[in-house]
């Protein structure tokens, strides 16, 4: 009888230690991620190097700009900015996008995401309109095709119609200088 009481003690100890071992394994994985030096704010995109998704969106009513048509990207460097009037970070980044619109190497287009037309028009009226075209995506289907995680997101499309760069989150002057401008220069220098 003493043998039967001793045998269950070993599995019970292992059962008690199992959560601790799992916790330690997860802690090691998280620590390795933190110490890897990788920028955790960068969200990889499977679309980098791929043709921009075929997108044809109607224009924002009440402004005199065309809608969004990805066929228009060929032959020029295009910055596609996904935004909405209800998006606080979009409002934060908008002055940066307006500043970029002065760069003659670029055509900046907007993909207005799940927004009310009157709010989108007010947003552009209040903050300025940096876009050469604004396509309306009321149900978010086009954004899904582009692989949008959340807005704002910005894509750089090269003259060849392929996505060269993606930025998730609001653009800042520092982001533009450090990451976007080198990509714009590469895309502008590339021939079709």
Image (spheres, rainbow, N blue to C red):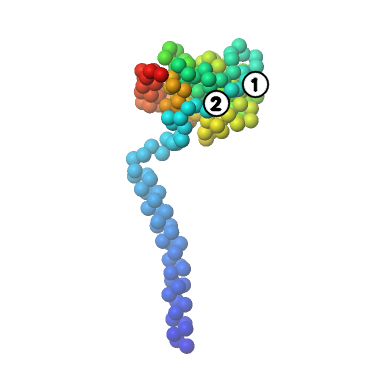
| Foreground tag (2 vs 1) | 2
Residue hosting label 1: 117
In this picture, residue 74 sits left or right of residue 85: left
Q: Residues within 10 Å of mark 1 (few under 14, many from 20)?
A: some
Residue closest to the eye, 65 or 162: 162
Under circle 2, the secondary element is loop
Residue hosting label 2: 54
Quadrant containing the C terminus is top left
Q: Position of residue 143 (x, y in %)?
A: 56, 30
Asked which quadrant contains residue 190, the reply is top left
Residue closest to the eye, 102 or 123: 102
Q: Position of residue 155 (x, y in %)?
A: 47, 26
Under circle 1, the secondary element is helix
In this picture, residue 112 sits left or right of residue 45: right
How far apart, in angstroms, are the residues tagged by discs 2 and 1?
A: 23 Å
Q: How many marks?
A: 2
Please determine whether, in this image, residue 1 is positioned above or below residue 151. below
The residue drawn where x is 55% and y is 16% is 133
**In the image as oriented, which residue stretches furthest toward the front?**
192
């Amino acid at each position: 009888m003493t043998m039967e009481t001793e045998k269950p003690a070993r599995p019970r100890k292992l059962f008690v230690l199992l959560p601790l071992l799992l916790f330690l394994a997860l802690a090691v994985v998280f620590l390795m991620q933190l110490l890897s030096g990788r920028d955790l704010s960068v969200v990889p995109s499977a679309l980098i190097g791929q043709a921009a998704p075929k997108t044809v969106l109607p224009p924002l009513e009440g402004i005199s700009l065309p809608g969004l048509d990805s066929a228009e990207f060929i032959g020029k460097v295009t910055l596609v900015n996904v935004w909405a009037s209800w998006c606080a970070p979009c409002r934060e980044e908008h002055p940066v996008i307006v500043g970029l619109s002065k760069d003659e190497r670029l055509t900046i287009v907007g993909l207005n995401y799940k927004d009310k037309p009157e709010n989108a028009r007010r947003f552009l009226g209040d903050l300025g309109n940096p876009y050469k075209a604004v396509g309306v995506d009321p149900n978010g289907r086009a954004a899904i095709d582009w692989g949008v995680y959340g807005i704002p997101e910005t894509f750089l499309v090269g003259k060849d119609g392929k996505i060269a760069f993606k930025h998730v989150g609001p653009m800042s002057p520092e982001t533009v200088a450090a990451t976007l401008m080198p990509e714009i220069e590469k895309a502008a220098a590339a021939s079709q």
